[in-house]
Image (cartoon, rainbow, N blue to C red):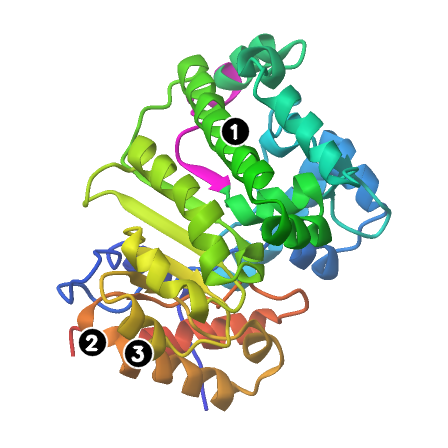
């Protein structure tokens, strides 16, 4: 079969397709992103540590990759201008350690060993002054330089964070989090409350230092929340979500988005009660199952990343048709991988994915 597609026209039309729960648009919209895992498979990298720590080298790699994706897919995915001095990451301020290893991507690691370590961390963290913790030396000067270079005002804070479960595993350790949430309720309640309050403080400091305003939307990425049984999720994570949404997405018209590319079936009823109205969940969920559990949420999914990477053209097309037939009719579908684009996915398969949405997702036929 001929999968001929004008990629530039595809993205131009795609911009007109994002009205939620409306079929007054040309077709189902499509969205995907390419991350650093994908980049390392697609172009030769002399050192991943150099990539993360040498901005000039990183921008060189990004420009090289962007030329390829612009030719193959009709758009670019990687920034070619970055700040040399950046604000400190929230989880690091709260006690996590940033780690780099050759051949891999950075991750956050905990040095917590016992529940007494959590007690000490709670005492330390509740006294933190975020304005003193966020900005390294030279941040203001780099902010001014970046704004002059790009002609754009820097906007930070108030619209995104990792979720409470994932941040807890980064700060306390995954096994510790699972054990402590079952056995140390009071200390863990204190931990999550302090983390919530400090995250709100963190956002407001960033917003006050930049041109960011509360734009009525908040996204939470919380892959590790699948580790929490519903009772523990309601106890520890739901109060975090409620307070963050009340602060940064307070009205029913605001976006409350949850990305968790994991097994989310057991938590969907709670997320519905929290007012989550946009989701990107893991590939084990059928889109019809998500729609039944969360009738007011725009579903960003639901093609499995390994189908997109390893599947035949027919398998990719059949999965797109499945998504559209299951939930596309109400206008509340954005066709997206159920997670992210897996490293090693060919440009050919991505174009077939785009072609299938273009052909079978139309509302104007």
Which label sits on residue 329? Answer: 2
Residue 160, image x, y percentages: 45, 38
Circle 2 sits in a helix, a strand or a loop, which is it?
Answer: helix
Which label sits on residue 194? Answer: 1
Residue 29, image x, y percentages: 31, 63
Residue at image point 67% right, 9% down: 137
Q: Dots 3 and 1: beta carbons under 8 Å?
A: no
Q: Is residue 30 left or right of residue 189?
A: left
**Which region is colored magenta?**
148-161
Residue 251 drawn above or below residue 144 = below
Residue 244 drawn above or below residue 11 = above
- Alpha carbon distance from label 2 to label 1: 43 Å
Query: What residue would you read off at disc 3?
Result: 324
Quarter in which the C terminus is drawn: bottom left
Residue 237, image x, y percentages: 46, 47
Q: Is residue 149 magenta?
A: yes
Judging depth in this view, the residue of 64 and 275 nearest the camera is 275
């Amino acid at each position: 079969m001929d999968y001929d597609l004008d990629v530039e026209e595809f993205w131009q039309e795609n911009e007109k397709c994002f009205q939620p729960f409306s079929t007054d648009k040309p077709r189902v919209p499509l969205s995907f992103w390419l991350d650093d895992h994908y980049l390392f498979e697609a172009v030769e990298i002399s050192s991943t540590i150099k990539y993360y720590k040498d901005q000039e080298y990183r921008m060189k790699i990004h420009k090289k990759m962007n030329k390829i994706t612009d030719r193959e897919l009709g758009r670019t995915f990687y920034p070619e201008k970055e700040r040399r001095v950046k604000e400190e990451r929230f989880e690091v301020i709260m006690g996590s350690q940033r780690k780099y290893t050759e051949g891999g991507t950075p991750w956050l690691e905990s040095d917590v060993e016992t529940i007494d370590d959590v007690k000490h961390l709670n005492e330390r963290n509740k006294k933190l002054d975020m304005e003193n913790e966020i900005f390294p030396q030279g941040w203001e000067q780099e902010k001014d330089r970046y704004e002059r270079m790009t002609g754009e005002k820097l906007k930070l804070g108030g619209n995104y964070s990792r979720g409470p479960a994932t941040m807890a595993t980064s700060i306390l350790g995954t096994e510790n989090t699972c054990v402590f949430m079952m056995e140390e309720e009071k200390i863990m309640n204190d931990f999550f409350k302090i983390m919530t309050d400090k995250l709100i403080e963190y956002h407001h400091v960033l917003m006050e230092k930049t041109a960011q305003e509360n734009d009525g939307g908040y996204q939470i990425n919380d892959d590790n929340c699948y580790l929490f049984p519903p009772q523990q999720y309601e106890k520890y994570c739901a109060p975090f979500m409620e307070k963050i949404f009340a602060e940064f997405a307070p009205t029913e018209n605001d976006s409350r988005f949850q990305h968790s590319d994991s097994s989310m079936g057991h938590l969907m009823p709670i997320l519905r009660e929290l007012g989550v109205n946009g989701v990107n969940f893991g590939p084990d969920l059928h889109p019809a199952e998500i729609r039944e559990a969360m009738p007011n949420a725009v579903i960003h999914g639901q093609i499995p990343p390994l189908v997109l990477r390893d599947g035949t053209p027919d398998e990719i097309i059949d999965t797109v048709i499945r998504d559209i037939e299951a939930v596309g009719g109400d206008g509340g579908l954005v066709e997206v991988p159920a997670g992210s684009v897996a490293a090693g996915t060919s440009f050919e398969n991505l174009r077939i994915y785009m072609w299938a949405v273009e052909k079978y997702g139309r509302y104007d036929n």
